[in-house]
Image: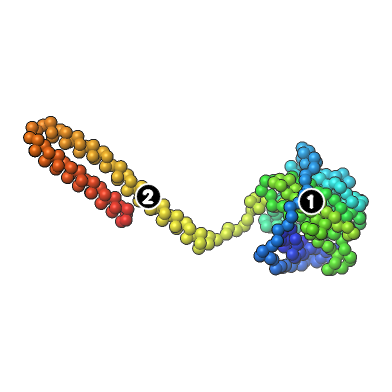
Amino acid sequence: GSGIFSCGEVKASYYKTPTWNPKKMGTIIYADLDSDVSLQAPSTLEPSSLLTWDATGNPGWQFAPLAEGYVCSDTICCYASNFVGNTYGYSIGVLGGIDSGCGNYEYGYDCGIASYHWPAEVCGIFSCMDQTGTCLDYQTPTGNLTGVRLETRVSTNSTVLPHVLAYGTSGSTSEQILIEPGTGLNFFQNGKVVVLTIDSFPHPISSAEIYGRLYEKDNLLYTCPVSSETEKNESDFSTDQSNVDIVNGGKEEENDFPTDQSDADTSNEENEEDNDFSMDQTNKGTSNGRGKEEDIVKYIFIVAIFRLFFQ
């Protein structure tokens, strides 16, 4: 199945039923979303001591009877507690690895199409008896579980969504009831820690999942085109960098002036030692020296301006 979610609420969904036709490739779903949604009150849930356990499991999807309370896949563990109703007829499942969309959930199985595989971290309970990958196919519940608490610890960059279905009455539009925040679903995430509590009474739970996606690890078969706005920003950066280089060049030219000035002073001192002129002649020579210095300053200033605007 698939769906459109907004602020924890399911706006549209699609799922396989027991009469689902395998030749049918699915359906396109759509929904109108609010552009200015109201904020929800923060959750009061807190993680329990179960998440302090240091446990690991085999890779791929792993399942166990719900009564056992937990199961692990690689470094991801799923814990279930606070049951309301009977756990009979339910399994607990977990995945820390690669999920698939072709119906075969055996570890390492290749669907043949790259887009049918994606990295995921999942913790959930399912209405099934045999603790295999068939639990991931929709089954009407045979038990009467109406309440449960799920906890897990995911990776830092995992994007997590809760997804809970309860069984209503038999029918194409009423068989599955989507449990939403404020109507029996309470969801909490703080970094890696994730908690989900469910109260679906009087309807028995069909499935409840904490589904995490590691989008940064997706192996995409395409690359996104560069927009014209991105190209403009890159062009602006290049122009700015060129201006910086020009300004820095001008500063380097100015920095050469103190050295030239020192050489001019030294030359003046040598001329004064070699020639015995009168005070008037000395003053005249000094005046001429200052004129030359001013000419040097003007020349350097003109060169810097020319480099700044014409290079």
Residue at x 48%, y 58% (from the top left corner): 233
Depth check, front residue: 59 or 45: 45
Q: Is there any visible trace of residue 207 in the rendered image?
A: no
Residue at x 62%, y 57% (from the top left corner): 221
- Image quarter (top left, top right, bottom left or bottom right) of the N terminus: bottom right
Q: Check disc 2: other Cα within 10 Å, few if <14, some if 14-19, many if 20+.
A: few
- Name the amino acid, label 1: Leu
3D distance between C-alphas at marks 1 and 2: 57 Å
Depth check, front residue: 78 or 180: 180
Q: Which residue appears farthest toward the top when viewing the image?
A: 273
- Whichever of labels 1 and 2 marks the residue nearer the N terminus, that label is 1
Q: Which mark is residue 245?
A: 2
- Image quarter (top left, top right, bottom left or bottom right) of the C terminus: bottom left
Above or below for 104 versus 28: above
Q: Mark 1 = which residue?
A: 196
Q: Check disc 1: other Cα within 10 Å, few if <14, some if 14-19, many if 20+.
A: many
Q: Is residue 227 left or right of residue 48?
A: left
Residue at x 27%, y 39% (from the top left corner): 258
Question: Looking at the picture, how far across and down is residue 219, in whole percent?
Answer: 64, 53
